Amino acid sequence: MIPRYTTPEMAELWSERSKLATWLEVELLAAEAQAQLGQVPVEAVRRMRERARVPDPDRVREVEERETHHDVVAFLRVVSEELGEDARYLHRGLGSSDVVDTATAVLLVRAADLLLEELDRLLGVLRELADRHRYTLMAGRTHGVQAEPITFGCKVATWIAELERGRERLRQAREAVRVGKLSGEVGNYAHLPPQVEAYVCARLGLAVDPASSQVIQRDRHAHYLAALAVVGGSLERIATEVRSLQRTEIRELEEPFAAGQTGSSAMPHKRNPILSERVVGLSRMLRGCAVVALENQALWGERDITHSSNERVVLSGATTLLHYMLRKLRQVLDGLRVDADRMRRNLESTGGLVYSHRVLLRLVELGLSRDAAYAAVQRAAAAVWEDPAPPPDALVRRLVEDPAVREVADEAALRECLDPAPYLKYADEILERVGVPRRQEVAR
């Protein structure tokens, strides 16, 4: 991944040195297991452990490009330079994929742990935001049109619930890739017994793949990248809502805008939701990585290498992108400006239309048929729509002009429907479901 979208933690994890260090650990553990089985001298393995050094990535690359044209063989040659005669016990009975796939599993598990930690931090920010705005009224919108009142806290609750599901998917995906294999070139343990595999995997914190070929089957990696893409889609949904509500005509939310920051090279007034838009854009790349992983499932026979080249990009790339996206969206939400007054003004700007359902139900309670009540409210609403600046009670004013309505209701009975209190009634319960406890003063 390019440096612009790379976090320091992921840069370190997916560095070439980190990869080679993990390869080396797999190799040394395999030698130790064979020593315990009496297949290689114990003293030789002890010396290997003492002398072996993580090779210089540039040196390995040089050997690969000039001599081997095979990265694992180049790695083994450079490591062997430090081992002398004991190098004969390095990579004994192993295939390249035994080392690469097992080491990749270790790195993917570590990457998942970083992602889960960052996701937990984001969820913490969201819970604080939901708590702070549990009673902040705003217009709920469907199809982009005002529907009924909601609270901003309850909107945030849907984000929390979705990301909690994403966290569980990511946890399950972590378990799916947390397997190693040292079963040989076609998975039949022809050159090493399963005990070696079990020893290495246990020391690395991995489970044993119960049935592997030359590789670990790629449904596991497809599951992993699909889980990342779904979490990315959830981040996209949040970022899309932030930038939508930052539009000039709405201006209910605004992502942080630092002193000295510029939104446009030509228009000094611009305060663009660039971080939210960046999250949206990068989520599209995550979905692309997931498609690549799905394509990698169908390898020829016991293995081909059509997955190898693209995995060098998508595995590190997808985990790095999501880590960056989680961190950036947390930055947005931690400094989010919520204009509660603007939310209330926007809610009242449509002349009470957001209360049309309550008015409809009240008219039915007072004796009108549902069809007649619906028609009356719809006629009044149509008139309010045409008013460029309707007062907050315009819907009721129009309704009481309708003869059918006047037969069953007076203005006072309908004005009661303009009270937003019922839309706040279960806010505490909704938030409690997503881990935001009730406030003590409310509980009393």
Image (spheres, helix red, strand yellow):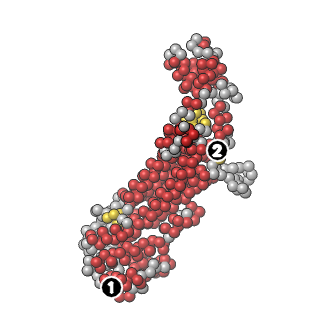
User: Is 122 positioned to the left or the right of 207 in the image?
Assistant: right
Crowd band around label 1 with a 10 angstrom C-alpha radius: few (<14), some (14–19), many (20+): few
Residue ranking furthest to the front: 444
Q: Residue at x 53, y 65 (%)?
A: 9
Which residue bears the numbered disc 2?
A: 338
- Above or below residue 108? Residue 135 is above
Q: Which x, y percent locates residue 252?
A: 64, 41
Of the numbered discs in the image, which one, if any, rests on residue 134? none
User: Looking at numbered disc 2 in the image, what kind of residue is underneath it?
Assistant: Val
From the top left corner, tell me how far across and down residue 321 is, in percent. 52, 59
Query: Label 1 sits on what residue type?
Result: Glu
Q: Callout 1: helix, strand or loop? A: helix
- For the question of whether residue 230 can be seen, the reply is no
In the depicted view, which residue is nearer to us: 34 or 36?
A: 36
Q: Nearer the N terminus, badge 2 or badge 1?
A: 1
Which of 327 and 211 lies nearest the eye of the viewer? 327
Neighbours of disc 2 within 10 Å: few (<14), some (14-19), many (20+) = many
Real-space Cα separation, disc 2 to disc 1, in angstroms: 67 Å
Secondary structure of residue under mark 2: strand
Image position, residue 102 (x, y; %)? 37, 68
- Residue 43 is labelled as 1
Q: Quadrant of the C terminus?
A: top right
What residue do we see at 55% from left, 42% from top?
439
Residue 422: tell me if it is visible: yes
Vertical placement of residue 69 versus 161, above or below: below
Asked if residue 37 is positioned above or below residue 146 in the image, the reply reads: below
Residue 3 lies, in percent from the top left, at 57, 65
Residue at 33% across / 78% down in the picture?
31
